């Protein structure tokens, strides 16, 4: 297939080469400096498992082989088509760059094959690679690992917004070098995470496969991804895409809760205090009783401020927002 110039590469050095394995008929190779042979072959071997996961879940790998190459790149990793370059320090024999390898391999599908048609929509590459690396880690190590990564990413997004209150798709940018940011990586990954929760796992993967099948070896814009997901899920995703991709920020929640013994209800007062627009979203609430029993309910937030009452099966002693880590937000409620 034709390869975009942005992901063409030539590397010239003395290399030790190992055939790490195969996924179907796709050869996976490790190319490292001879003095790093043992460490490099060990560190890069995980690429076979990563490739297998994406190949079987997204769609057929778009190139004939995959080489993972120790190099002088100034980046942690650079997703050249079929020959990913990693920094020299990625080889240490500790196997601690698995997330980076997953990120760069995800780019073989999103960025190298299905690629954005305009740099302002680069989240279709970087946000996808960020979240699909987390999906691989969830597959390999369980949901707790995904939650850990999402929490780290959420903290970065919140801190970044304090100095950079721009949306993910920021068409006002004229310096294209600035399109690569926490917004287009971690926040965009969070958008995909929330989209997965909104439509459910089955429809999420159905839409992802359909999107890749449609735009592989081609280019797409955000509207194309939206349209594909709407077709796959049968849902109108206009509000979701508008507020999370074309508006800056995220909900900042404050408020109070108390238990009313007369009605056996939890009474909530919730406000969004972030500047700009208010967001509309489902909010999961987890209540814990004195005996350790738990109860989760979901409410819909559709206004800047709201009052809600919930019937609960026990007297709660604590209340937690977003217990299963599906929402990009900051803040909390306090007991009144």
Image (spheres, rainbow, N blue to C red):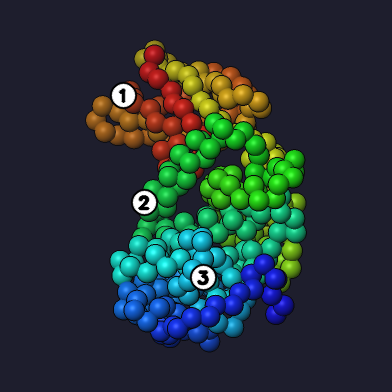
- Residue at mark 1 to residue at mark 3: CA–CA distance: 52 Å
98 vs 35: above or below:
above
Q: Is residue 27 left or right of residue 184?
A: left
Q: Secondary structure at mark 1?
A: strand
Q: Which residue is mark 2?
A: 144
Q: Of marks 1 and 3, which one's residue comes earlier in the chain?
A: 3
Q: Which residue is mark 3?
A: 85
Residue 35: x and y in percent read 34, 79
Residue 10: x and y in percent read 59, 77
127 vs 281: above or below:
below
Q: Of marks 3 and 2, which one's residue comes earlier in the chain?
A: 3
Residue at 34%, 35% (x, y): give it.
Answer: 294
Q: Secondary structure at mark 3?
A: strand
Q: Which residue is mark 1?
A: 317
238 vs 48: above or below:
above
Proximity of marks 1 and 3: CB atoms separated by less than 8 Å: no
- Residue at mark 3 to residue at mark 2: CA–CA distance: 29 Å
């Amino acid at each position: 297939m034709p390869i975009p110039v942005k992901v063409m590469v030539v590397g010239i050095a003395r290399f030790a080469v190992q055939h790490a394995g195969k996924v179907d008929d796709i050869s996976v190779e490790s190319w490292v400096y001879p003095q790093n042979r043992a460490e490099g072959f060990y560190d890069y071997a995980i690429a076979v498992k990563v490739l297998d996961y994406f190949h079987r879940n997204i769609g057929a790998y778009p190139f004939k082989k995959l080489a993972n190459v120790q190099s002088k790149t100034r980046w942690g990793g650079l997703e050249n088509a079929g020959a990913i370059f990693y920094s020299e320090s990625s080889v240490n024999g500790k196997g601690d760059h698995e997330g980076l390898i997953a990120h760069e391999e995800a780019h073989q599908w999103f960025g190298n094959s299905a690629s954005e048609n305009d740099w302002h929509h680069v989240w279709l590459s970087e946000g996808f690679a960020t979240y699909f690396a987390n999906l691989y880690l969830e597959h390999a190590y369980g949901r707790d690992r995904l939650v850990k990564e999402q929490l780290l990413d959420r903290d970065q997004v919140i801190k970044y917004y304090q100095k950079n209150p721009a949306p993910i798709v920021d068409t006002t940018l004229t310096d294209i070098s600035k399109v690569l940011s926490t917004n287009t990586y971690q926040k965009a990954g969070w958008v995909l995470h929330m989209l997965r929760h909104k439509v459910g796992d089955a429809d999420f993967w159905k839409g992802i496969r359909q999107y890749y099948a449609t735009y592989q070896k081609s280019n797409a814009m955000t509207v194309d991804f939206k349209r594909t997901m709407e077709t796959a899920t049968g849902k109108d995703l206009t509000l979701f895409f508008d507020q999370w991709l074309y508006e800056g920020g995220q909900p900042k929640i404050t408020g109070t809760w108390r238990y009313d013994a007369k009605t056996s209800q939890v009474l909530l007062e919730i406000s969004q205090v972030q500047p700009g627009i208010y967001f509309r979203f489902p909010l999961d609430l987890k209540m814990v009783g004195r005996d350790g029993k738990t109860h989760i309910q979901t409410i819909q937030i559709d206004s800047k401020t709201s009052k809600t009452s919930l019937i609960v099966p026990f007297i709660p002693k604590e209340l937690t927002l977003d217990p299963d880590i599906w929402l990009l937000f900051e803040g909390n409620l306090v007991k009144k």
